[in-house]
């Protein structure tokens, strides 16, 4: 299937606004053509530095300006992070994501420590992802050299809605960070949140932006807002499964080789709703008790769901090019020869 990065806004709108059953059927067919159906990437997300963030993201309980009951803590000890990574691996996760409540990466001892964590977790055979805020080209390259596999930096919403949600960094700041990640050869993970008070047009515009980047993100998380008391969006109503299905199915059609992650909000979804999302093209989840600071289904609940639905975890490093020979996982990450060894 030919990948397109030249979708028009009208084309995305036409796909999104189909009757929901036709949309899901189309997405399921494309998913079966381009992905291993029944295979789901299992990721675990750990907050390695919580709270005290200077930004004003209206949805975020870690913003210092909101009174949400989140206790700020400094960077976790390496041993605690590595123990969490081992528990995640033992429970079936193949990607371990580390998040820090920073506005941006600073070249200091904390960043040096994160680089060390990346190298050590990478050495455990897990794909390593980080979400650390904005970064520059030099910092992206350092992360790559440490063995980082993916970097998450969400767009959150459309350019038009963005200033209603965040004023402490711009939409272009986010796009620039994605460009730095891409240039460093790190997999791009970028998606958004629905339920912020946005319109369908905002959702369509965000999907259009993601699908017309120079290359499709390797992962697109679709998050449903988890309202937190003390944030400006605490009173927002729960997002329905039909809204999630439209986002997931449209993302799958636009970006057929991308991992579409059913992310925040899954705690409130029964297995029947999650099954519909997998049918619509979702093939990645976060598993573990928390997503940074908000509740999430635990490993045992997800194992039971996988058994019921006949799903299996996707293996680590599956995106190493076909025919390549893996040389090892050193401080530079997964190293491979792009042509078969004769």
Image: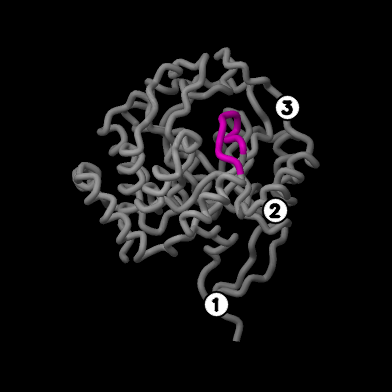
Mark 3 surroundings: few (<14), some (14-19) or many (≥20) residues within 10 A: few
The answer to whether 111 appears left or right of 289 in the picture is: right
Q: Residue at x 56, y 32 (%)?
A: 295
Which quadrant of the rendered structure holds the C terminus? Answer: bottom right
- Residue 310 vertical position relative to residue 284 in the rendered view, above or below: below
Residue range in magenta is 289-298
Label 3, label 2: how many angstroms apart (C-alpha)? 26 Å
Instruction: Return the residue nearer the eye: 173 or 19.
Output: 19
Q: Residue at x 46, y 20 (%)?
A: 58
Q: What is the secondary structure assignment of the residue under circle 1?
A: loop
State the residue position of label 3: 74
Of all residues, the one furthest to the bottom in this rendering is 342
Q: Position of residue 335 (x, y in %)?
A: 64, 65
Q: Residue at x 41, y 51 (%)?
A: 278
Residue 339, numbered label: 1
Q: Position of residue 242 (x, y in %)?
A: 31, 39
Instruction: Return the residue nearer the eye: 229 or 7.
Output: 229
- Residue 319 vertical position relative to residue 179 in the rendered view, above or below: below
Q: Residue at x 34, y 66 (%)?
A: 33
- Residue 232 vertical position relative to residue 259 in the rendered view, above or below: above
Label 1, label 2: how many angstroms apart (C-alpha)? 33 Å
Question: To which quarter of the image does residue 10 belong?
Answer: top left
Mark 2 surroundings: few (<14), some (14-19) or many (≥20) residues within 10 A: few
Q: What is the secondary structure assignment of the residue under circle 2?
A: helix
State the residue position of label 2: 90
């Amino acid at each position: 299937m030919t990948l397109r990065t030249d979708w028009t806004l009208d084309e995305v709108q036409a796909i999104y606004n189909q009757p929901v059953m036709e949309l899901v059927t189309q997405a399921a067919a494309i998913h079966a053509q381009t992905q291993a159906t029944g295979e789901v990437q299992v990721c675990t997300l750990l907050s390695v530095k919580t709270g005290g963030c200077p930004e004003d993201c209206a949805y975020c309980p870690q913003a210092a300006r909101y009174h949400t009951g989140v206790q700020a803590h400094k960077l976790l000890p390496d041993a605690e992070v590595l123990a969490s990574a081992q528990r995640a691996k033992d429970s079936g996760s193949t990607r371990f994501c580390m998040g820090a409540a920073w506005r941006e990466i600073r070249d200091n001892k904390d960043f040096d420590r994160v680089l060390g964590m990346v190298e050590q977790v990478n050495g455990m055979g897990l794909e390593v992802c980080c979400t650390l805020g904005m970064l520059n080209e030099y910092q992206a390259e350092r992360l790559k050299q440490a063995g980082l596999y993916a970097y998450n930096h969400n767009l959150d919403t459309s350019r038009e809605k963005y200033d209603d949600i965040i004023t402490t960094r711009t939409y272009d700041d986010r796009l620039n960070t994605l460009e730095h990640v891409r240039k460093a050869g790190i997999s791009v993970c970028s998606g958004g949140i629905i339920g912020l008070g946005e319109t369908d047009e905002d959702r369509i515009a965000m999907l259009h932006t993601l699908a017309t980047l120079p290359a499709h993100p390797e992962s697109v998380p679709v998050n449903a807002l988890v309202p937190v008391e003390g944030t400006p969006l605490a009173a927002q109503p729960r997002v329905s499964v039909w809204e999630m299905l439209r986002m997931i199915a449209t993302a799958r059609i636009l970006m057929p080789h991308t991992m579409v992650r059913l992310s925040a909000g899954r705690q409130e979804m029964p297995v029947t709703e999650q099954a519909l999302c997998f049918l619509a093209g979702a093939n990645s989840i976060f598993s573990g008790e928390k997503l940074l600071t908000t509740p999430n289904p635990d490993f045992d609940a997800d194992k039971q769901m996988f058994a019921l639905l006949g799903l299996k975890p996707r293996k680590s490093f599956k995106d190493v090019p076909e025919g390549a020979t893996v040389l090892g996982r050193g401080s530079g990450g997964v190293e491979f020869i792009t042509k078969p060894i004769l």
